[in-house]
Amino acid sequence: MKIVRKGSHPILERKRQGEMEYLSFPALEATGMVGHLFSTRIGGVSQGIFSTMNLSYVRGDDKEAVDENFRRIADALERRVSDFVCSDQTHTTHIRVVTSQDKGKGVLYPKDYREVDGLITNEPGIVLSTFYADCVPLYLVDTKNRAIGLSHSGWRGTVSRMGACTLEAMSQTYGTRPEDVTAAIGPSIRMDCYEVSEDVAAAFQAEFTKEILEEILLEKGGGKYQLNLWRANQAVLEEAGVSKSQISITDICTCCNPDYLFSHRASEGKRGNLGAFLYIKKG
Ligand SMILES: [Zn+2]
């Protein structure tokens, strides 16, 4: 399938596992420390609006289909479904310190926590799992202390500096220093496709400097703006101390590629979920 990309230099690599296609950041692979992927719609077993690689159990898809889709993701990651630990996303900046006690939660077992948009761990083999259809995934890898974070950052998360909140949780829990972190901003909606209203714009205007606002917010008139979540999340990570050279930014927009990726905007909400996954390899 041909996909629309932004920029001339591909940031994400397209990979296959059997029928399944997924996306991978070479910069995260180059750490040698983690396994990761971002899923596409290709190579799952779900039907209709969920076709084919839907990873949500709560949007109306058949449980058996989602189970099989998770098994295929696990194969691509060379892990088991029982290694997965899922977020409970409600656009908060709450972050859970994940341990082996949590393994399987959200896939094999019910979650016993609520309102968790970020996951961190330093235990090898646990697959941190978060879910998307236009919002921004943030992958964080502390190569010095061997700790990771994976966070969901929509516009609410972005304006609340979810990237910095996740780094702060990693710092408090594992001693992470931002300068030791390799980060990736995953597939999500790009500025040209993301129109927002006055109230969203006002939230960003209250939080970010004039210099950053010039890059992330474009006023179109009529109370409408275009918002650049990619650049805003990059700015949050840089302000928190992550080196610019250590941040990979997606070149693929969910909304521009609605047959390849699930997009809430492009589908007007009739869609499944994509997944971002990250785990520490046994050292
Ligand atoms: Zn787009």
Image (tube, grey):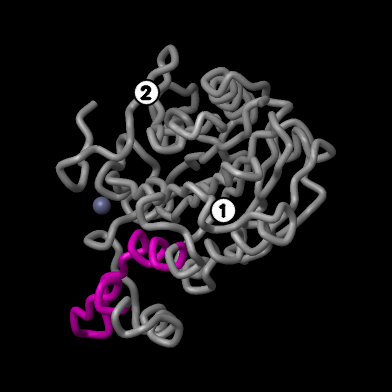
Specify the quadrant of the image occupied by residue 213.
bottom left
At horizontal 19% and vertical 79% (from top left) the residue drawn is 220
At horizontal 80% and vertical 36% (from top left) the residue drawn is 100
Q: Is residue 234 magenta?
A: yes
Q: Which x, y percent locates residue 11?
A: 29, 40
Q: Is residue 179 magenta?
A: no
Task: Tell me the tag on residue 15.
Answer: 2
- Of residues 271 and 143, the one drawn nearer to the viewer in this rendering: 143
Report how far apart the C-alphas of labels 1 and 2 lie in the structure. 23 Å
Residue 217, placed above or below residue 172:
below
The amino acid beneath tag 1 is Ser
Q: Are marks 1 and 2 in contact (CB under 8 Å)?
A: no
Q: Which x, y percent locates residue 87?
A: 65, 49
Sequence-wise first label, 1 or 2: 2
> For the view shown, which residue lies furthest in the top direction?
18
Is 106 on the left-hand or right-hand side of 178? Answer: right
Residue 195, placed above or below residue 32:
below
Residue 93, placed above or below residue 26:
below
- Of residues 102 and 220, the one drawn nearer to the viewer in this rendering: 102
Residue 222, placed above or below residue 104:
below
Whether label 1 lies within 8 Å of ligand 1 gets the answer no
At horizontal 44% and vertical 55% (from top left) the residue drawn is 135
Q: Which residue is mark 1?
A: 151
The amino acid beneath tag 2 is Lys
Q: Which x, y percent locates residue 263?
A: 37, 48
Is 120 on the left-hand or right-hand side of 48? Answer: right
Q: Which x, y percent locates residue 270?
A: 42, 47
Task: Tell me the tag on residue 162.
Answer: none
Q: Pointer 1: residues within 10 angstroms few (<14), some, or many (20+)?
A: many
Q: Which residues are magenta?
A: 213-237
Quarter of the figure with the N terminus: top left
